Image: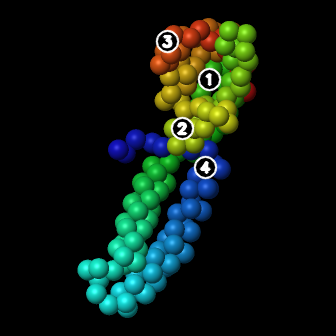
């Protein structure tokens, strides 16, 4: 559980912003909801109070996850090397189709946006290879042969 969490500087800043908003704004809002619902009387049959308690539990869980992530965050340094590393922008050829991906940590991956995790099958396969290499990607659909065209 104490493994480093790889984040871009932008990803870390977004998480810090979310954390600060949850702690300073959302906690206060939920505390007010709890107080208002408690003022309505019997808490044993108070749906508003139950709902506010559920929201509070979810909020505290998210805050705890963000605290853990930020405590273990390692900001990715985008340095260009001849080998694929976390932070690399990689252009590949998959059977005549070219795609470009940025290799990031799992929390920032968004395959539809060209951001893949270093822990995904493709990310793992590309790591530490160089332009011109053909790598085998062991994906759920089977083994794919991918050629690395360039690394930025």
For the residues labelled 3 and 2, the Cα–Cα distance comes to 24 Å
Question: Where in the figure is residue 84, as x and y percent of width and height?
Answer: 62, 23
User: What is the quadrant of residue 56 in the picture?
Assistant: bottom left
Q: CA distance from mark 3 to mark 4?
A: 32 Å
* 3D distance between C-alphas at marks 1 and 3: 22 Å
| Secondary element at tag 2 | loop
Residue 25, above or below 16: below
On residue 105, the disc is 2
Please tell me whether mark 1 or mark 2 is closer to you in this view: 2
Quick check: marks 4 and 2 in contact, CB under 8 Å?
yes
Earlier residue among tags 3 and 4? 4
Tell me the mark number nearer the camera, choosing from 3 and 2: 3
Q: Is residue 40 above or below residue 144?
A: below
Q: Residue at x 42, y 68 (%)?
A: 55
What residue is disc 3 on?
A: 142
Q: Which residue does the numbered mark 1 point to in the structure image?
A: 84
Secondary structure, mark 1, is loop
Comparing labels 1 and 3, the label whose residue is closer to the camera: 3
Given this view, does label 3 or label 4 mark the residue nearer the observer?
3
Q: Earlier in the sequence, mark 1 or mark 4?
A: 4
First of labels 3, 2 by sequence position: 2
């Amino acid at each position: 559980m104490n493994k480093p969490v790889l984040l871009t500087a932008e990803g870390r800043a977004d998480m810090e912003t979310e954390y600060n908003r949850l702690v300073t704004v959302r906690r206060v809002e939920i505390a007010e909801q709890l107080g208002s619902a408690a003022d309505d009387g019997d808490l044993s049959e108070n749906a508003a109070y139950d709902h506010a308690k559920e929201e509070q539990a979810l909020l505290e869980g998210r805050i705890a996850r963000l605290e853990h992530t930020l405590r273990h965050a390692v900001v990715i340094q985008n340095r260009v090397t001849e080998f694929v590393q976390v932070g690399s922008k990689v252009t590949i050829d998959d059977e005549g189709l070219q795609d470009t991906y940025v290799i990031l940590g799992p929390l920032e991956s968004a395959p539809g946006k060209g951001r893949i995790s270093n822990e995904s099958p493709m990310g793992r396969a590309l790591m530490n290879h160089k332009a011109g290499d053909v790598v085998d990607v062991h994906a759920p659909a089977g083994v794919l042969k991918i050629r690395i065209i360039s690394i930025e």
